[in-house]
Image (cartoon, grey):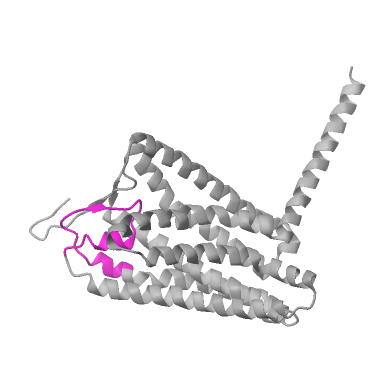
Amino acid sequence: MREGNGSRVKEFILLGFPGSRELQISLFVVFFFMYLLTLIGNVAIIVLVKIFQKLHTPMYFFLCNLSFLEIWYTTACIPKTLSVLVAHNQTISFLGCITQMYIVFSLGCTEYFLLAVMAYDRYLAICHPLHYNIIMSKTLSVQMAFSCWICGFLIISFPAFLITQLSFCDSNVINHFFCDIEPWIVLSCTSTYTVEIVWFIIAAIVIVGSCMITLISYIYIIATILRIASVQGRQRAFSTCSSHLTVVIIWYGATIFLHVIPSKQQSQELSKIVTVLNTIVTPLLNPFIYTLRNTEVQEALRTIFRASAVNLSRRHNKDNKLTSHHP
């Protein structure tokens, strides 16, 4: 655990959700089923888009990227959290902690960038429909998605490197269910000023920058929709971006609650609750939001159900014929 006079903590303890055994088991059951549904829902979206040619558009390409991201984003946190809850396996190595923190925040940054790109895609589709296919080509959509992933992972590299240079030599208890950066760096016995400044700048660039792109895109989108003469036309235009707008509101709503905290005493417990919203609830809701609010996805699902019903009926008729020929 410690070494020499300049002793350094080699592993940390994740406090998780302290409470009775009944509470721990209840949380385990809830988180496990939510995690399972998250995997099924997001994999289903990817498979659905892959199967149906009609969904081979930039919007659904970005949606596949988002679903793929959500699978890994929640996987980076939840399995260890489940282990803490049911097996009381609360220890995590320094390397494991920095790796988890890096992956979670890199994917989080990538999600901000993807949501901004998706907002820009909806802006082009609604505000410049005649030029949409020319501007948002397959090449450009791939380049934009690739840039989101690269930027998300690169931008967290610097603060992650700075954290590896810190010494942790007193308490090794992290008051969280994963290696979140804020409750982690407060344990350092060396100066964290540089890390905090760098983290603040990166958070401002990523959150404010992506939020501004999303906000400006939707200002133009709403202004364009309001200029459409027919009510049916306005409804049809809004339906193409309502799913994305719902996801944006949930994601940025959680971010606002996470960073605008009422007091230091409430901050740690509040951040745990809101982080649950970001790491478990939002990845679970995304596929259902796109399924329930998107007419093209609904149509694809209806096609699958109709095809399944037809196949089931044919198989049933075939079995009946075989039974009638062999009494």
Residue furthest to the top in view is 327
Residue 200 horizontal side relative to residue 255, left or right: left
Residue at 72% over, 71% down: 237
* Total numbered circles: 0
Residue 231 image offset from top left, x and y in percent: 78, 71
Q: Is residue 99 left or right of residue 138?
A: left
Q: Is residue 187 magenta?
A: yes
Q: Residue at x 42, y 63 (%)?
A: 257
Q: Is residue 302 visible?
A: yes
Up the image or down, 214 lies above or below 264; here it is below
Residue 256's image quarter? bottom left
Asked whether residue 136 is in view, the answer is no
**Residue name at image x 58 percent, y 57 percent:** 286
Q: Residue lying farthest left?
A: 5
Task: Residue 121: give x, y in percent of width and height.
Answer: 63, 74
Boundaries of the magenta span: 160-189
Of the pair 189 and 273, the residue shown nearer to us? 273
User: In the figure, is residue 74 to the left or right of 307?
Assistant: left
Residue 312, position as x, y percentages in the image: 80, 37
* 290, 117: nearer the viewer: 290
Quadrant (top left/top right/bottom left/bottom right) for the C terminus? top right
Left or right, 152 with respect to 293, comes to left
Residue 226 sits inside the magenta stretch: no
The overriding secondary structure of the stretch rendered in magenta is loop
